[in-house]
Amino acid sequence: MAQSPVPDLPPLAISLGDPAGVGPELIALAWAARGEHALPPFLVTGGAGVLAQAASSRGIALPLVHIDRVQDAAAAFPDALPVLADAGDGVFTPGQPTEAGARLALASLARAAQLALSGEVAALVTAPVAKAQLAAIGFTHPGQTEFLAHACGVEEEDAVMMLAGPSLRTVPLTIHIPLAQVSAAVTQDLILRRCRVIAAALRRDFGIAHPHLALAGLNPHAGEKGRMGDEEERVIAPAIAALQAEGINATGPHPADTLFAPHKRGSYDVAVAMYHDQALAPLKTLDFDNGVNMTLGLPIIRTSPDHGTAFDIAGKGLARPDSLLAAIHMARQAAVFRAAAA
């Protein structure tokens, strides 16, 4: 059941992303569509000059207002995009990433995370960054998710990536590892740990009182009773039984080739896949333009568009803001559920 709106939530914070990518122009497009899409107030941490240049590349008239206090963002938002000046600025260099741009992206992310942790903003939406560029300036985390987990004092294993769109929510149990390593990485402990986080997050951030987690098998036909692999019987099924004993509505292991069929998707709240492409292929097929990457298990709310920097199309007028708009709406709705439950 949907919760009643909470009218006095703080604004959202959006981090700039890499100034050579599509993030700045998508932020400008989102603000320009604020009325049409009934967006909640948001501010951007730094990059006013980058945003102005990115908006110009898309032919958008983008009034900007520098703010020193987060609480000034909501009043400014209807007439101008509020930008918190203390996170720095740079140059919009579409398709040409630079060290200076990576430093600005990191400063913007760090400032936005700080605001979320302090409770000054209701949620954090992160624009895309380039992991290789960040690594070149000494960034030691695999990505923004791990950076935010560290900032929040949460172990990386408990920061869970969920991809969500209008048709599907799905979580990859293992993420950026070679396929040859997946079988060894899928353990009962990992399944239990991740699924506990998922169930708690669906209750807290989506208002689903008794979420149904459908776990996919690893092998074809979910192992066919051991004929095509024994991970289902040896690892996945015992983990599901343990989750059920804890009161979590987990089912499976389901054959992955039918789990995402139309008549199946309505029967569960989230599909838990065993590896990256098992989760992302159906999500991107069904909801490519509206997919959202949400990090579960953090004390803050963090969403992100489900795409990267797209250096190849940055500044060319081709990038669409749909995924960013969906990320903003999802962040706001999660903030509403958390505030209502507080």
Image (cartoon, rainbow, N blue to C red):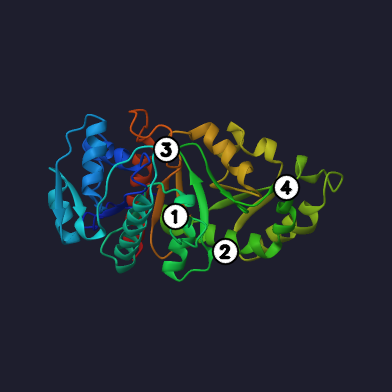
* SS assignment at label 2: helix
Q: Which mark is residue 157?
A: 2
The three-letter amino acid code for the residue at tag 1 is Leu
**Badge 1: how crowded within 10 Å, few (<14), some, or many (20+)?**
many
Residue 85: image location, x then y, percent? 20, 57
Q: CA distance from mark 2 to mark 4?
A: 20 Å
Q: Residue at x 82, y 43 (%)?
A: 224
Residue 178: image location, x then y, percent? 68, 49
Chain-order first, disc 2 or disc 4? 2
- Figure disc tally: 4
The three-letter amino acid code for the residue at tag 4 is Leu
Q: CA distance from mark 1 to mark 4?
A: 33 Å
Chain-order first, disc 1 or disc 4? 1
The three-letter amino acid code for the residue at tag 3 is Phe
* SS assignment at label 3: loop
Chain-order first, disc 1 or disc 3? 1
Q: Which mark is residue 134?
A: 1
Residue denoted by label 3: 311
Position of residue 115 relative to residue 27, above or below, is below
